[in-house]
Amino acid sequence: MEEPKVELDDLEVNQDRLKQNTIQLKNVRVYGSLNAGVIAGILGMDGWIGIGIYVAIFFIVSTCLAIKMNFKVKEYFKSSYDAYYSGIGTDLLLFLMIWVIFHNLVNIL
């Protein structure tokens, strides 16, 4: 006799784990933005090339996270948007601030 299959939508969400996963995701994104800003600033990137570094590192981080989760994002987050795109605006502001600081420290001073 076969056991009934349980759909992912039928499972109860553990709110503590969901909150912990969201916090860890935010930390990874913040460190990725910091590193992207430092890299772009030290290398003296200007204009769209610097933004391209941020976008590239953002998608590299998202891809690494997806690989780590075996592309089963719904098991760890409420939606795939939360895992792939959440925080792109706030992290961009952090990137811009760090980029400008390091660019000024290395290339102007």
Image: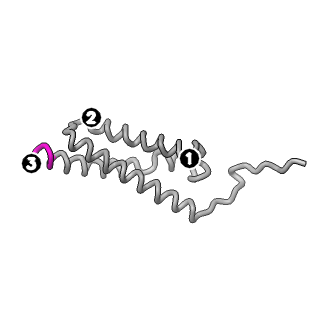
Q: Is residue 93 visible?
A: no
**Which tag is nearer the camera, tag 3 or tag 2?**
3
Q: Is residue 34 visible?
A: yes
- Please tell me whether mark 2 sits on a helix, a strand or a loop: helix
Circle 1 residues within 10 Å: few <14, some 14–19, many ≥20: few
Q: Disc 3 residue type? A: Leu
Q: Which residue is mark 1?
A: 69
Q: In front: 78, or 28?
A: 28
x%, y% of residue 43? 21, 39
**Which tag is nearer the camera, tag 2 or tag 1?**
1
- Please tell me whether mark 1 sits on a helix, a strand or a loop: loop
- Please tell me whether mark 3 sits on a helix, a strand or a loop: loop
- Marks 2 and 1, the one that precedes in the sequence: 2
Query: Which residue of the protein is positioned furthest toward the bottom in this rendering?
Result: 16
Q: Disc 1 residue type? A: Met
Q: Badges 1 and 3: C-beta atoms under 8 Å apart? A: no
> Which residue is located at x 32 percent, y 36 percent?
52
x%, y% of residue 62? 46, 43
> Which residue is located at x 43 percent, y 55 percent?
26
> Which residue is located at x 60 percent, y 45 percent?
72
Distance Cα–Cα, label 3 vs label 2: 23 Å
Distance Cα–Cα, label 2 vs label 1: 31 Å
Q: Which residue is mark 3?
A: 109
Residue range (magenta): 104-108
- Marks 3 and 2, the one that precedes in the sequence: 2
Mostly what secondary structure, the magenta segment? helix
For residue 14, what is the image quadrant? bottom right
Q: Which mark identifies residue 48?
A: 2
> Which residue is located at x 61 percent, y 51 percent?
75
